[in-house]
Amino acid sequence: MRLHEYQSKEIFTTYDIPIPRGKLASTPEEAKLIAEELNCAVVLKAQVLVGGRGKAGGIRLVRTPYDAEEEASKILGGRIKDLPVRRLLVEEAVNFNQEIYLGMTVERKSGQTLLIASAAGGVDIEEVARSTPEKISRIRVNPLLGLRDFQARNLASEIEISRELWRSFIILTQNLYRAYTDLDATLAEINPLVVTTEQRFIALDGKMILDDNALFRHPEFVDKRDISAEQPEELEARKFGLSYIKLEGNIGCLVNGAGLAMATMDIIQHKGGNPANFLDIGGGASAEKVAAALRIILADKNVRTVLINIFGGITRCDEVAKGIQQALQEIATDIPFVIRLVGTNEVEGRAILASANLDTAETLQEAAEKAVAMSKESLP
């Protein structure tokens, strides 16, 4: 779950991370009133879940409340990278001497938190990593030990923060790490973290992504999700407890188990095809859940064939077959299917599929080969 900048900064405030004074505006009139209240030059920042807002005209510096109202009217109601702008964060403009990047995320290879910092803040950190990797410092944090003061101190030294600011940097970094761990985040980022002319740290921008799998521990965030930036298919999948990610290919995939789903996508590509999605129906899926998954797959206009790969352990193959039948009764489609059922009640499941004249396969390799061939045959 991605949070807006203003939501991330609300969290920062809770964890004593300094942010500029500011408020959220939904209309040009509100932007003007906030600018009057702040009584200084302000920055208008479009609240959309996408990068590159500044280049797209979604961040503007204005000097007066009247300018704030006029510029807000140009941003609100518009679109940035096809996402609607419904809210603006109106913040005081800050004078600063230095911009720093500070972030932390999960490094899956080591199973640790990767703490990243760079003196080249305020720009695209991915581009910095590509063009000048020496400007990025990294420290791995053992989750059993947590972030130690000496690690943050070493980071401050590496990115050449003034020694008199080390203590403040350590405290701020520790606070960000606490927010990251307390909220089960997969990303916590400040870019830029600036050093003001008064030698204070302020988080000018903030970004946090929370782990969807841990939201049951944080019910206060469930209703704060902005669905405007999400694919309709992914929203529909969430209603049925399905793990779905839309891709660019033309072979729809319905699989039970994340590992098996990844293996299925791999073998499709190995055989020369392109998967249209990742879809894991999970263990013990009912016929209703399978039918919902197929409706989502078939709603994708790029799909030319569907590969269903089920290993029946907890999931019963006959239940999957009934779900396929149910979906095809509800949705008229001429898209070909290739189905591999192995495991619990596979004989019964294959009998149901045979009665519906659906193509089956004994092995995953055979299923992938058939699906790739069908996808190419059905291309215009």
Image (tube, rainbow, N blue to C red):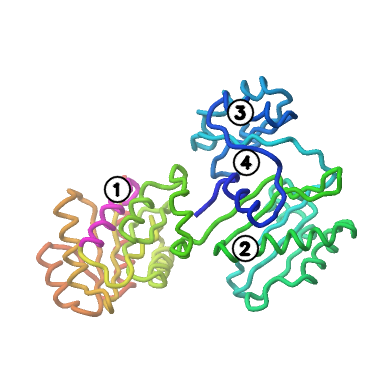
Q: What SS does tag 3 mark?
A: helix
Does residue 34 appear left or right of residue 235 in this picture? right
Which circle, 3 or 2, is nearer the viewer?
3
Q: Looking at the image, which residue is at 66% across and 64% down?
A: 177
Q: Which residue is mark 3?
A: 31
Q: Earlier in the sequence, mark 3 or mark 2?
A: 3
The boundaries of the magenta stretch are 288-303
Residue 164 on image: x %, y % = 90, 58
What residue type is disc 2 on?
Thr
For the residues carrying marks 1 and 2, which lies nearer the camera in this image? 2
Q: CA distance from mark 3 to mark 1?
A: 41 Å
Of pointers 4 and 1, the one earlier in the residue sequence: 4
* Type of the residue with mark 1: Ala
Q: Is residue 162 above or below residue 301?
A: below
Query: How far apart, in angstroms, are the residues tagged by discs 2 and 4?
Result: 20 Å
Q: Residues within 10 Å of mark 1 (few under 14, many from 20)?
A: few
* SS under mark 4: loop
Check residue 52 in the rendering and tell me which mark sits there, or answer none.
4
Q: Can you tell which mark lies on residue 279?
A: none
Circles 3 and 1, Cβ within 8 Å, touching? The answer is no
Crowd class of label 4 (few under 14; some 14 to 19; many from 20; radius 10 Å)? few
Magenta residues: mostly which secondary structure? helix
* Residue at 61 percent of width and 62 percent of height: 180
The residue indicated by pointer 2 is 105
The Cα atoms of the two marked residues, 4 and 3, are separated by 22 Å
- Determine the residue located farthest toward the right in the rendered image: 163
**What residue appears at the point 82 percent right and 68 percent down from the top-left corner?**
154
Q: Earlier in the sequence, mark 4 or mark 3?
A: 3
Magenta span includes 236: no
Residue occupied by mark 1: 299
Q: Position of residue 67 (x, y in %)?
A: 67, 21
Rendering coords of residue 29 (x, y %): 57, 23
